[in-house]
Image (cartoon, rainbow, N blue to C red):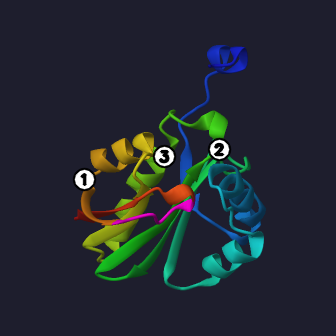
Amino acid sequence: MISLLDRFFPSRSPTVRDAVAADVPHLAAIHGRAFARGWEPDEFERLLSDRAVRAHVATLGPRRPPVGFILSHVVPPEAEVLSVAVVTDRRRRGIGRALLSHHLARLAAEGVSTSFLEVEEGNQPARALYERFGYREAGRRRGYYAGGADALLLRRDF
């Protein structure tokens, strides 16, 4: 449900930028609310310091905290999306779409020609987003997630 504040003062389009060390607490908080097993801040610190990782965040204005992020491990010509998350009350407002669009464009500029990711089979909103960006099922990991849900391995060729 859209709050009154959002109705009268709609948020502007998200700004997507490279993630920086100061974003780590926000990334851990977003991830912790989005997934059954959240990553700790030290995991994000390690990822952001890894030269093979590309990380982008979405904000709703300058000097505002991230409301979403995307991370990939890149070894051209391939990349694997490690995680994508958007804060719960900002979902379905184009933030994931903006993140994925920016991220994939940056990967392509680096010479990536194939991107992979895993998504829980029952996560219909995420699957619809990835499908819009050309990801197609390339495999399945049975019982991969807690509770026994399958993971779908998706692939996108640029």
Find disc 3 in the rendering and name its residue.
96
- Quarter of the image with the N terminus in it: top right
Say if the magenta span includes residue 143. yes
Quick one: label 1, few (<14), some, or many (20+) residues within 10 Å?
Answer: few
Q: Main structural element of the magenta stretch: helix, strand or loop?
A: loop
Percent position (x, y) of residue 134?
24, 53
Query: Between 138 and 26, which is closer to the camera in this rendering?
Result: 138
Quick one: label 2, few (<14), some, or many (20+) residues within 10 Å?
Answer: some
Residue at horizontal 62 percent and vertical 55 percent from the top: 35
Mark 1 and mark 2: span between their CA atoms? 24 Å
Are the residues tagged 3 and 1 within 8 Å (C-beta)?
no
Percent position (x, y) of residue 127?
37, 47
Are the residues tagged 2 and 3 within 8 Å (C-beta)?
no
Q: Which of marks 2 and 3 is nearer the N terminus?
A: 2
Find disc 2 in the rendering and name its residue.
87
Q: What mark, if any, has residue 134 been given in the picture?
A: 1
Mark 2 and mark 3: span between their CA atoms? 10 Å
Percent position (x, y) of residue 5?
72, 18
Span of residues in magenta: 141-146
